[in-house]
Amino acid sequence: MAKIKPFRGIRPPREIVTEVASRPYDVLNSDEARAEAEGNPRSLYHIIKPEIDFPEGTDEHDPRVYDKAVENFTRFRREGWLVQDQEECYYIYAQTMEGRTQYGIVIAAAVEDYMNARIKKHELTRKDKEEDRMKHVRVNNANVEPVFFAFPDNPALDAIIRKVTAGPAEYDFTAPDGFGHHFWVISDRELVDRITEEFAKIPSMYIADGHHRTAAAALVGHEKACMNAGHTGREEYNYFLAVAFPSSHLRIIDYNRVVRDLNGLSADGFLEKLERDFIVEDKGAEVYQPAALHNFSLYLAGRWYSLTAREGRYDDNDPIGVLDVTISSDLILRDLLGIEDLRTSKRIDFVGGIRGLEELKRRVDSGEMAAALALYPVSMKQLMDIADTGNIMPPKTTWFEPKLRSGLVIHSLED
């Protein structure tokens, strides 16, 4: 059962929240963060991407950069740009995109739930990325950025969300990307206790986005427990910061592929070889969106094509084999184009569906890429089924949007 607790959040005063809040550290590079933070000493980028306070070209993994994160975090608190709540609370964090709003509950999730696989993952992580975030958590003694969880729908928690969000929000703003962010504080002890009790009835939570941050936060908590001779299990480091959304609120969008070459094939030769495993239909110059599972969109030589996997080329009873990312990786990228490892190959790149299929067309038309492949998005049910069976999705399968805004609330590991 899911073990969570309320916590004393560290967060910005309402009047400066838009100055503090930022995009997550891993969705932009150092130059982009430097540009977004220009002229704004209160931007959270000074804590989560502190290399922006050094000359351009400074290695973001330089020990001085981690030290700067601590210095800036301390300064933010000293200046009153980040203030800790006096009592333990839960929070509601809602996001609005294209007129649709999803509501999450901000919690302190248990390290032991991650270590015991009650918090389930669907992606592999890289040790170098884990270690980077572990260093950031260690030096700040805090989870500065939240991770993104899903949980099976729960009517009682839905009722609490409706009750709380009927009142005025603590924060309510639209970010520069056009997405709305809304935030409520839950300090009522009865509601706090009910939230804790309802989560205790939920058998598992699922990592939707942020596998590296989740692993890093949990591993630092576990590390602290092992190093503390007087460990009791009640210390704050036994928990880490997460925003948990009912699964029905979430929508996974497509995560598409662009390839640099056709492995020596001509465009016509490539299309001819595709006919073995797919029904290929020429859709002309107008953008073609995949219509259903096992239907793909190919952009090649100025034209769009529909590719529908032929029966018998996939196994509907295999939770991994049935995924369109597996079908395309095996039958197209591996068998025809010779791209074996999606994680390391320099011949392939990935484009989040938030950028639209026009971005695929642009990259091919520019000559940078030879072809683009658009996939029908994975469903939340598929994600949860895969996690429940202990399987791992292929690389670059899911894209969640909008991303969580960082800086709305921080979890300290100090008691």
Image: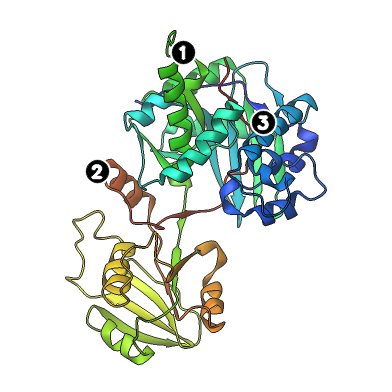
SS for callout 1: loop
**Mark 3 or 2 closer to N-term?**
3
Label 1 sits on residue: 234
- Mark 1, Cα crowd under 10 Å, few <14 / some 14-19 / many 20+, is few
Q: How far apart are marks 1 and 3 (CA)?
A: 25 Å
Can you identify the residue that label 3 sits on? Answer: 70
- Cα distance between the residues tagged 3 and 2: 40 Å
Cα–Cα span, label 2 and label 1: 31 Å
- The residue lying at 25 percent from left, 60 percent from top is 322
Query: Which marked residue is nearer to the observer: mark 3 or mark 2?
Result: 3
Q: Pointer 3 and pointer 2: residues touching (CB < 8 Å)?
A: no
What residue type is disc 1 on? Arg
- Disc nearest the viewer among 2 and 1: 1
Number of marks in the rendered image = 3
The numbered mark at residue 389 is 2
Q: Which of marks 2 and 1 is nearer the N terminus?
A: 1
Quarter holding residue 50: top right
Q: Do the residues labelled 2 and 1 touch (CB within 8 Å)?
A: no
| Quadrant occupied by the N terminus | top left
